[in-house]
Amino acid sequence: MKKVLVDAINDQINNEFYASYLYLSMSAYCEGINFSGFASWLNMQSVEETGHGMKLYNFLIDCDEKIVLKEIKAPPSEYPSLLALFEQVLSHEMHVTKSINALYNIAHKENAFAVQAHLQWFLTEQIEEENTSRNIVEKLKLIDTDVASLLALDRELESRTTAE
Ligand code: FEO
């Protein structure tokens, strides 16, 4: 595999692990304000992001390429509101989509067919990831300051049982 591609995949591993760290920090924040459903949902999202990072990690291992793990920056620990927090989730997912697209573009230019095939899963996954976080943002906008609806959404998010 060309170095430019290996470097870009290593960067994407870092992106996914940062997402995991960010969502874990958001989960901790939600625990702190007693919204355990939001916290549980974000905790599972964090686990899912670690899985995405490992999917790329294992791909590089299988291709006998070099893993270079980079520093993971510290995520914010405070959020102005649940809406602002989920707007950040959505904006991070949009950032990840852009970076997966850029990675796919490099693989395409380099005629790296196996890499393109592997990235197909991520392209599809990003549609789901953006859609899910956008739905939560839209619900939070509708709810505004209605506490009963906010608690109902907290219960709904608590029903998520898998990190997928
Ligand atoms: Fe791995 Fe949510 O992007």
Image (cartoon, grey):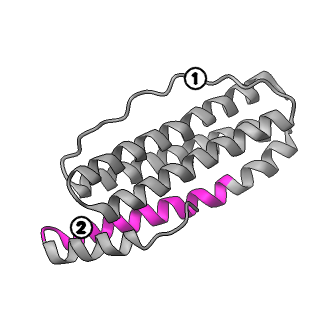
Identify the residue shown where x is 40% and y is 63%. 134
Given residues 123 and 20, the one toward you in this image is 20
Part of the protein shown in magenta: 122-145
Q: Which dot marks residue 70?
A: 1
Q: Secondary structure at mark 2?
A: helix
Q: Is residue 58 above or below residue 85?
A: above
Q: Quadrant of residue 8?
A: top right
Across and down, in percent, residue 111 comes to 86, 39
Task: Please name the amino acid that badge 2 sits on.
Answer: Lys
Identify the residue shown where x is 79% and y is 47%. 116
Query: Is residue 104 visible in the rendered structure shown here?
Result: no
- Does the segment drawn in magenta span residue 155? no
Mark 2 to mark 1: distance in Å? 36 Å
Task: Please name the amino acid that badge 1 sits on.
Answer: Lys
Question: Circle 2 is placed at which residue position?
Answer: 141
Q: Is residue 38 left or right of residue 146?
A: right
- Does the segment drawn in magenta span residue 136? yes
Q: Quadrant of residue 149?
A: bottom left
Across and down, in percent, residue 46 comes to 49, 49
Q: Main secondary structure of the magenta part?
A: helix
Q: Quadrant of residue 137?
A: bottom left
Q: Is residue 58 left or right of residue 124?
A: right
Q: Secondary structure at mark 1?
A: loop
Quarter of the picture containing the N terminus is top right
